[in-house]
Structures are given as structure tokens and as C-alpha cells.
Amino acid sequence: MTVAAFMDLALYDSQLGYYARAAQRSGRAGDFFTSVDVGPLFGNLLEQQIAEMLQILDSGFPIPDSLDLVEAGAGNGRLSADILRAARERDPALVDRLRLHLVEASAEARHVHAAALAGLIDRNRHTSSASLPESFEGVLIANELLDALPVHQVVMREDGLREVFVASREGGLATVEAPPSTPALAAYLARLGVALEPGWRTEINLRAVEWVRDAGRRLRRGFLILIDYGHEADDLYSATHAAGTLTSFTHHTMAGPDTAAHTPPWLERPGGQDLTAHVDFTSVRAAAEDEGLVTLGFMDQTYFLLGILTGGGTPDPQPVNLRESLALRTLLMPGGLGSTHKVLILGKGVEQPALLGSSFRQRVT
């Protein structure tokens, strides 16, 4: 089977998949750490950006009766709960107009959505589903979704491009190379003008491109905020990442690519560890623009959050207490979440408004 098919089973199989078997996988007791695990500050800051976007949509004509907030890859609903809690404090009337859609593949996680949202939004104004709403107008946020979508892995050899497959060997699993399973893989690299050197190994996320195209079609008018770790294509498909980026996480320990072994770390314990690969933001952005969306910003998470905090002025955030100060430092820290995570903001039917998140500095490192 392809690596993409293996990842699909290992992560999302309804019975054995890593994400399917638990409502939450991140945090101190989990396998990895996300911005949501820092505390409610991340949701509080996102709410300010989302509120500005919804105000922009409200300023148009005709003014919509209600607006949609969609969280894709919502997990157990903690981020949306933090966003709603902040919105309740700042503008409760806005919350009363919202329709919230939590989109999550894991049935275990969906099962706790109602409890996570209790007291924050009327029960008849939120949905919980494995699929994006058929059509929506408002804001979609996806925090660390694209990096967890199944990827194909390829390697360049002297005689041309080969794909890596997963096969059974001596009672276990191993990787083997064979001709690509689909011409879409070579076409993907050709579209980017990428020429891999012999021996270079990399991942191609066809699913991420399909996902953003689908989201763009379903969005009638509004914004997408995509937050993930990744790179522009000329960086991702270069000597810097010539071993690939497919990685596993267990108990906050990362096991990176091991090209010398027939059983790389990501192939061990299927369903028992997180699997992830860096996002090709060049292809994601191009796919969105093909669907009529406009890029409004692309930057490190540090600069996105500083824009919200300062409105583009001199950075002078004023944390309320020590806990919030430490949380803010974690979210902004270069070399950590602040620089590994990138933020791509896209708009449809909204022209090119000046947004808080894009107001400080649009820079990626």
C-alpha cells in the first residue's frame, strides 16, 4: 500500500486509528504540544481576528442574518470553546448570530463537543460532523490539520522517480520502492518546477490540495485561517529537507526520517503514535487561488499574533498575570511555536482588507 493509505489507516481507521481512539492526543499527558495546549490565550487572540473578519462581512450588502464559524480538525472542541468564551465577554450579540460547525474525523472527539460548548452557544446553533458544511459564509479556521493529512512519499533514483510503499516482510512492515501509484505525483513536482536530486526523499500531500480546493468551493464569502508547520515549496523540496519530513511523535519524543532502515520510525506501532509531515504552503495557496480565493497574508505565527496584540504598532503586549505572560512567550517564541508554525490567511468575496493579523510584519523564517 502507499504511505498515504498506511497513514489513513494508522491515523483515522474507525477502530484502530490513532485519532479515532481518543478525544484528545495533545497536551502534557499526550504525545505532542499545540498552541491550544498553552491555555485560553491562543483562542482569545484568534477571537479578535475572527471578530474583525466577521465585522468586515457585516459591513457588506446584504448583511447576512447569521454568520458561520467553522473549525476544521476541531479535536475535542477546546479551541472553539476558548474563542466563544472570549467572544461572549467582548460581544455577546455576535455570538448569538453565529452558527458554529465543528468538523472532526474522530467519533470519540465529536462525542464530547456538546459538553465542551455547554453554556457558550445555543444547542441549535452548532453542529458536529466529520465533513465541512455544504456551504458557509464566515470564517474557517484549521489549526494543525493539514500536517496530519496522509501523504505520499517519493524518492528520486538515477532511473527516475520512485514511490515508497509499505509491505509486509518477515512478520512485520517494511518500506519498498516501486513506480509511482499515480501520475499526479510527478505532475505535482513538475507544476512547482521542482527537480529532485538522486537520493532525495520527500512527501507530497495531494490530500491537502484537495481539501483546500473543497473548502474554497464551499465558502460563499469570507475567510480561511490555516495554521500549520511547513514551508514554501522551494524550501521544502530542497537539500535542507532531502531526507523528507515524515515524522512520528510519542510522549513528546520526535522520531524523524530514517532512510537507512526498512522499518523507519513512522512505520512502527501503527495506530499507536502520531504521524505528521510538513506542509507545502506554495501548493496549498495556489490551489486556494484557483478556486477564487485571494491571499491576504502569510507569516510566522509570531508576527500574526503580534499584529493582533499591537494592531501593527510597536510591540508592547501587556499580559494580565504571570501565567498569561508565560503562555504568550510560548506562543511567540522563535524556534518554537512562534516560528515553526506559519499562518496563511485567505479571503473570498471580501476584496483585500487590512487585517490585524497581517498588520505587524509578513515574514516567514
Image: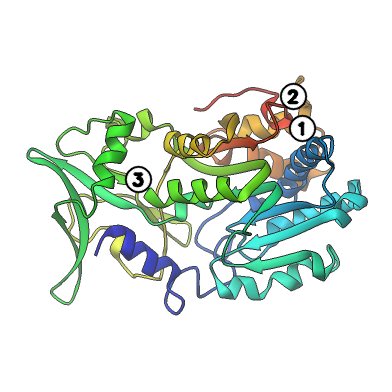
Asked which secondary structure carries label 2, the reply is loop
Look at mark 1 in the image and give the residue it sits on.
309
**Mark 1 burial class by Cα count in 10 Å: few <14, some 14-19, many 20+:** many
SS under mark 1 = helix
Residue on which the image places disc 3 = 245
Q: Amino acid at mark 3?
A: Thr
Tell me if residue 235 comes above or below residue 12 in the rendering.
Answer: above
Give the CA distance from mark 1 to mark 2: 8 Å
Name the residue carrying label 2.
Answer: 315
Q: Residue at x 83, y 50 (%)?
A: 86
Mark sitting earlier along the chain (2/3): 3
Q: Is residue 265 visible?
A: no
In the image, 265: left or right of 180? right
Q: Are marks 2 and 3 in contact (CB under 8 Å)?
A: no
Camera-nearest residue between 62 and 210: 62
In the picture shown, does residue 73 fall above or below 9? above
What is the residue that sits farthest to the left in this orientation? 159
Callout 2 amino acid: Pro
Label of residue 355 in the image: none
Q: Position of residue 208 (x, y in %)?
A: 45, 49
